[in-house]
Structures are given as C-alpha cells and as structure tokens.
C-alpha cells in the first residue's frame, strides 16, 4: 500500500504525517479492520496485529456510560479484548437465557477468550451483567482467574496490567 502526501499542505498535517509514518521511536500506523490507528513503539509487531504468543497492552483513555475509548477509537458496543485484539461481543447465543435473568447474561455459549491467565469481566456501570455459573465453572476448570467487577473498576484493573489478561466489557446498563 502506498502512502501519498495530502494535496493541500496543511502545515500541521504535513509535519505530523511523515513522523507518524516514518519517524523513529514514534508510533507506526496500523491498518486493522479498515481503521487507521496508531500504537506505541513498545507494542509494534507488524502491520496487522500481534504475532502469536505476545501480550499487547491496550490503552484506555475514557469510559462513560455506553462508550469506551481504547487505543484512540471510541466503541459504543460491548467489547472482547483477546490478546490485544479488540472485537465486538456477540451475545446472540446467550439470548435464550434472557428471560431467566432479566438481562442477556454472559454464558459459555458465547465466544469467550479463554486463552489467558486472567479474564476480566466488566459488568456495566452498575454491575447489571449476569455471569452464569457455567462461566465460573469453566474458568475454574481451565484454571483461569475470573475477575468480575463493574466496568469502570474492570478498566482500572486492566490499566494496571494487561499481561496474560483478556477482557469482556459490558458498556450499558
């Protein structure tokens, strides 16, 4: 993929763009999921995400009811952070349990990122996301530490250290 300089030379943009693309010690540009984003030098591992077996940190720069800002991108849906990769939580498989819990719970029917030592679950601003017992039992069976906290506190835990940690963050309720 070739990069072209902007046609109109905005002095600020003309100065920043080459530094982002080529500057030593500065963030490299990543193209993942058709989004342009930057990562700090310590987390660089290629143009399309991490290599297997590496632990990448994600940077949280804001959380409010219904949205979270991670690595400079604002998300307004539930997230799964799996080895530094961010994806949307698909809760369809758990909807069949909604009537029993009054809310769509987190169940093992979903694609849970188990390949970690610690799984952090953010249960919303007020802790409304139910976590089914089968998730707790599966975590125990896989010897994964399960940390279940309201989302703001879960983000605080992830900010301290994301090494060998994955997360599921519920943003509303």
Image (tube, rainbow, N blue to C red):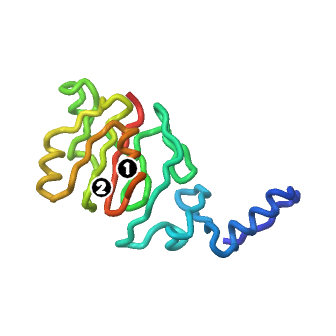
Residue 57 versus residue 103 in the image, above or below: below
**Which residue is nearer to you in this view: 59 or 77?**
59
Query: Where is residue 30 shown, x and y percent of the image?
Result: 58, 64
User: Disc 2 to disc 1, how far (Cα)?
Assistant: 8 Å
Residue at 53 percent across and 53 percent down: it is 71
Quadrant location of residue 117?
bottom left
Q: Which residue is mark 2?
A: 113
Query: Where is residue 39 shown, x and y percent of the image?
Result: 56, 63
Q: Which residue is mark 1?
A: 80
**Which residue is nearer to you in this view: 109 or 117?**
117
Query: Where is residue 24 shown, x and y percent of the image?
Result: 66, 75
Residue at 14 percent across and 44 percent down: it is 134
SS state under label 1? strand
Residue at 49 percent across and 41 percent down: it is 68
Dots 2, 1 in contact, CB < 8 A: yes
Decide: few, some or many residues near mark 2? Use Cα within 10 Å; few <14, some 14-19, many ≥20. Answer: some
Horizontal side of residue 23 vs 169, given as left or right: right
Query: Where is residue 41 shown, x and y percent of the image?
Result: 56, 69
Quadrant location of residue 56?
bottom left
Residue at 40 percent across and 45 percent down: it is 155
Mark earlier in primary sequence (2, 1) = 1
Is any part of residue 75 visible from this angle?
no
């Amino acid at each position: 993929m070739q990069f072209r300089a902007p046609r109109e030379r905005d002095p600020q943009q003309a100065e920043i763009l080459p530094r982002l693309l080529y500057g030593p010690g500065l963030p490299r540009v990543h193209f993942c999921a058709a989004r342009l984003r930057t990562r700090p030098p310590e987390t660089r591992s290629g143009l399309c995400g991490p290599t297997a077996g590496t632990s990448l940190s994600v940077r949280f720069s804001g959380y409010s009811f219904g949205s979270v800002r991670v690595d400079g991108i604002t998300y307004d849906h539930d997230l799964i952070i799996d080895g530094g990769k961010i994806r949307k939580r698909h809760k369809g498989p758990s909807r069949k349990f909604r009537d029993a819990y009054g809310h769509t719970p987190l169940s093992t029917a979903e694609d849970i990122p188990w390949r970690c030592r610690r799984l952090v679950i953010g249960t919303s601003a007020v802790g409304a996301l139910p976590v089914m017992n089968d998730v707790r039992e599966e975590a125990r069976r896989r010897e994964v530490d399960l940390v279940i906290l309201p989302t703001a506190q879960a983000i605080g835990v992830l900010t301290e250290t994301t090494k060998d940690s994955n997360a599921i963050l519920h943003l509303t309720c």
